[in-house]
Image (cartoon, rainbow, N blue to C red):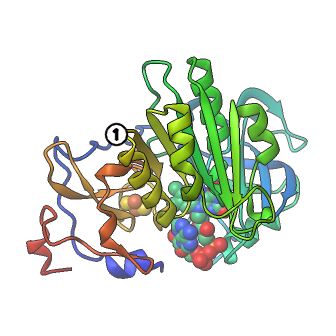
Amino acid sequence: MSRASEQRTAPVPTPTASTPSAPTPPEHTPHVTGELVATRRVGAYHHLTFVAPGVAELARPGQFVAMAVGGDTSANLLRRCFSIHKVSSIDTVSPGGAVGGTIEVVVAPRGPGTRWLTDLKAHDEVSIVGPLGRGFPLPPDPVPCVLVGGGYGSAPLFWLAAALRERGCHVEMVLGAATVDQLFGVVEARHAADAVTVTTDDGSMGITGWVSDVLPDVIRRSGAKTVYACGPMAMLRSVTDLATAQGAVAQVAVEESMACGIGVCMTCVMPVKGDDGLTRMARSCVEGPVFRGDRIRWEAFENGRCRVPEDAYGAASMSGH
Ligand SMILES: Cc1cc2nc3c(=O)[nH]c(=O)nc-3n(C[C@H](O)[C@H](O)[C@H](O)COP(=O)(O)OP(=O)(O)OC[C@H]3O[C@@H](n4cnc5c(N)ncnc54)[C@H](O)[C@@H]3O)c2cc1C
Ligand code: FES
């Protein structure tokens, strides 16, 4: 079981009307058999396209899908979650006979689940639940925005960029990764955004350094009012700090370990402040994965673990857990 479930066995207070963002799990989230229709290697990642009837039609940028891995008799009981990179709601007829819209995901092979997915061949089938979670909120007015992606975290941002530009927003992107092969979508970003800045830790592409090294300048130059980000937690924290310091709001898509993905198991809880200033343990799968960065209690995350802050709602009844 994941690090999160080891840590978070204590009961979590029932969300109330003043919970940071009251959960609204979709009543009838599609659970479909997806057929893999295209697979492509992109640097360190695998870009997979599935015909997934009913999923694409409902999805919004920033939402994710949960995929069963390992086949029918697998011991890998937990689904694995992936941001939706793109959707097409135009019906595609797969060679296997499935008809429906397509969803695309970008997978970094790491453990048994992701490796199983990236070993799939065209026409293989996967059980898919989604779209899940809350996506990125779009601004009502055409304001300048900066989109920051770390590694495969840039995958959901292109679709977001298109939605923002449709609303007349000026969109700049900052993409960063450790090395060039862990960057995703640099070429696509040049079409999707009005300006793009690339960073790599080792200087193998773009500016040597982290996205946080260039972000203050990009926010200043663009006059961004909202900064959207997806990537590792440490990156999301510094994006939040830098955006807040410049008077912009950060909307960040977190990647907390998840088990059920539908709000039942509490594996994914993290401390988030509500409108009333009170910290509650929010389920990132249904109340997120997108949160206002300045509402997240970042100091609770340490060494890949998250603790319940002592002042969190209901913490005393958790005996300090
Ligand atoms: C909302 C969300 C969006 C994600 N989007 C993507 C994406 O677009 N591309 C991508 O490659 N990966 C993404 N991930 C991470 C991906 O789900 C994990 O890499 C994957 O679950 C690891 O499974 P595994 O069997 O390969 O590895 P294992 O380490 O064996 O995983 C075992 C369990 O650990 C948990 N876990 C392990 N690593 C992570 C992680 N980094 N984040 C969350 N849970 C983890 C999962 O619950 C999994 O069930 C996302 C995760 C979340 C929660
Ligand atoms: S993953 Fe189960 S409640 Fe969020």
Q: Quadrant of residue 182?
A: bottom right
Q: Is mark 1 within 8 Å of ligand 2?
A: no
Residue that appears at 74% across and 72% down: 115
| Kind of residue at badge 1 | Thr
Image quarter where ligand 1 lies: bottom right
In the orientation shown, which residue stands out farthest toward the left? Answer: 316
Q: Quadrant of the C terminus?
A: bottom left
Is residue 63 found left or right of 157 in the rendered image?
left
Label 1, secondary structure: give it. Answer: loop
Q: Residue at x 21, y 57 (%)?
A: 280
Q: Residue at x 56, y 35 (%)?
A: 221
Q: Is residue 77 visible?
A: no
Q: Which residue is mark 1?
A: 24
- Seen as rendered, the residue at the extreme right is 95
Quarter where residue 164 is shown: top right
Say whether residue 219 is left or right of residue 317.
right
Instruction: Say which residue appears at 81% left-offset and 31% top-offset.
Output: 92
